[in-house]
Image (cartoon, helix red, strand yellow):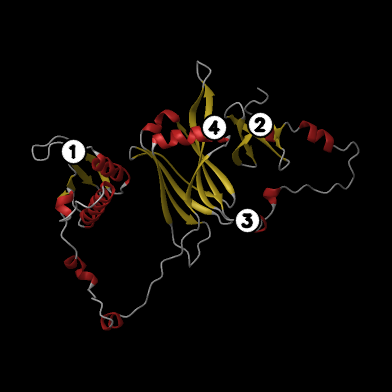
């Protein structure tokens, strides 16, 4: 192989020098240029020695100007690049390939990048989970138009319900912008395998998941008087008595469709599932609002579609300590018990 880890290189497109920090596969390497790490094809880089030799002066002038590096320029002069379009924030996954004993190309690990394709810098709190349990966390910042390398994930772990949660805030707060913005990505193994195969066919570098296109504005506080609302015919309740107007929380909810709606023969399976999930969301939020220690969700056995959907939601719900689906005398295997933490 032409390159090795630690080799100094020249990025042909930008004429910048850096070094190789990882060999990803036979065609790609991970490089670092002025503290920024990103993948590159081998035909996009070269050794810097010819450049250095060609630029070397045999008789340097006596008053040679002092060289100024980009990272010495004040930030306000390089923070924005108006020639670049804002394309939002993305989570990029770069598969690292290797050859197995049969000389077949296999994925060894996944390199996770946060790509800021905007003219604004962000702070972020990153958390990566397997099966709903935190595996890796990081708090840092990502400057404008920057790819930020976060960490590697062993490819063998992808089957354990891989998901990501990221909480963003502005590096320079703005009074009209939200204090923070939470977003998440949940990856199903089968879909990821298909994306990797498509990536190889298309000869692309990474799999990209959009996190947000535009950072949200702060919610407006509508200063409308209570009298105006009353006069307009709206019912106005005292906030201190809000619980009086909310249904009482239940420790057991039955999601069988006949328990939710009277007539359901005209509904499709997809419509039935959506009604059941909406009912689950309502009672789940009420249980947390009333600080219930636990609740039982009756989903039935059937083909297991509703149970699978409920379990997928519980894995990413905040405040869920754990949940179990075991045999009981009352429900058999048709119910799941959820335990909360506050």
Q: Are marks 2 and 4 in contact (CB under 8 Å)?
A: no
CA distance for labels 2 and 3: 29 Å
Q: Which residue is mark 4?
A: 200
Quarter holding the N terminus? top right
- Residue at 21% over, 68% down: 242
Please name the residue that numbered disc 1 is placed on: 301
Instruction: Give the answer, above or below, for where 245 lies relative to 127.
Output: below
Of residue 320 and residue 313, the one placed in the foreground of this image is 313
How packed mark 4 is, by other alpha carbons closer than 10 Å (few <14, some 14-19, many 20 or more), is few
Question: Which of the two marks, 2 or 1, is nearer to us in this view?
Answer: 1
Residue at 65%, 42% in the rendered image:
34
| Residue 332 pos. (x, y %) | 12, 36
Q: Secondary structure at mark 4?
A: helix
Task: Answer with mark 1 or mark 4, whichever residue precedes in sequence.
Answer: 4
Dot placed on the residue nearer the N-terminal end, 2 or 1 = 2
Q: Is residue 191 left or right of 313 when viewed as pictured?
A: right
Question: Foreground residue, 62 or 22?
Answer: 22
> How far apart, in angstroms, are the residues tagged by discs 1 and 4?
40 Å
Query: What's the residue at 49%, 37% (across, down)?
Result: 151
Q: Which residue is mark 3?
A: 79
Which of the two labelled residues, at mark 2 and mark 3, occupies the earlier sequence position?
Answer: 2
What is the distance, in whole Å, between disc 2 and disc 1 at their CAs?
54 Å
Mark toward the start of the polypeptide (3 vs 1): 3
Q: Which residue is mark 2?
A: 42
Residue that extends furthest to the left in the rendered view of this protein: 329
Residue displayed at 38% across by 72% down? 221
Q: Nearer the viewer, mark 3 or mark 4?
A: 4
Disc 2 versus disc 4: distance between alpha carbons?
16 Å
């Amino acid at each position: 192989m032409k390159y090795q880890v630690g080799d100094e290189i020249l990025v042909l497109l930008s004429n910048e020098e850096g070094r190789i920090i990882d060999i990803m596969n036979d065609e790609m390497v991970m490089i670092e240029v002025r503290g920024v790490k990103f993948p590159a094809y081998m035909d996009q880089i070269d050794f810097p020695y010819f450049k250095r030799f060609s630029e070397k002066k045999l008789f340097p002038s006596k008053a040679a100007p002092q060289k100024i590096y980009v990272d010495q320029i004040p930030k306000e002069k390089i923070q924005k690049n108006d020639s670049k379009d804002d394309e939002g924030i993305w989570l990029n996954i770069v598969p690292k390939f290797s050859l197995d004993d049969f000389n077949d190309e296999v994925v060894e690990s996944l390199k996770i990048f946060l790509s800021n394709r905007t003219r604004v810098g962000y702070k972020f709190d990153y958390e990566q989970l397997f099966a709903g349990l935190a595996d890796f966390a990081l708090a840092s910042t990502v400057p404008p138009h920057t790819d930020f390398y976060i960490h590697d994930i062993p490819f063998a772990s992808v089957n354990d319900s891989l998901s990501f949660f990221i909480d963003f805030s502005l590096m320079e707060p703005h009074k009209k912008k939200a204090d923070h913005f939470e977003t998440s990505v949940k990856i199903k193994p089968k879909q990821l395998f298909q994306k990797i195969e498509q990536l190889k066919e298309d000869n692309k570098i990474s799999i990209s998941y959009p996190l947000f296109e535009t950072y949200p504005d702060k919610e407006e506080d509508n200063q409308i008087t209570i009298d105006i609302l009353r006069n307009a015919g709206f019912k106005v309740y005292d906030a201190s008595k809000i619980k009086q107007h909310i249904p009482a929380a239940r420790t057991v909810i039955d999601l069988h469709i006949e328990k939710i709606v009277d007539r359901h023969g005209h509904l499709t399976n997809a419509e039935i599932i959506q009604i059941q999930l909406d009912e689950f969301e309502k009672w789940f939020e009420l249980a947390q609002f009333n600080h219930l220690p636990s609740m039982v969700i009756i989903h039935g056995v059937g083909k297991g579609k509703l149970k699978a959907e409920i379990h997928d939601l519980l894995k990413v719900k905040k405040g869920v300590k754990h949940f179990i689906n075991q045999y009981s005398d009352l429900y058999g295997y048709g119910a799941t018990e959820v335990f909360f933490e506050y």
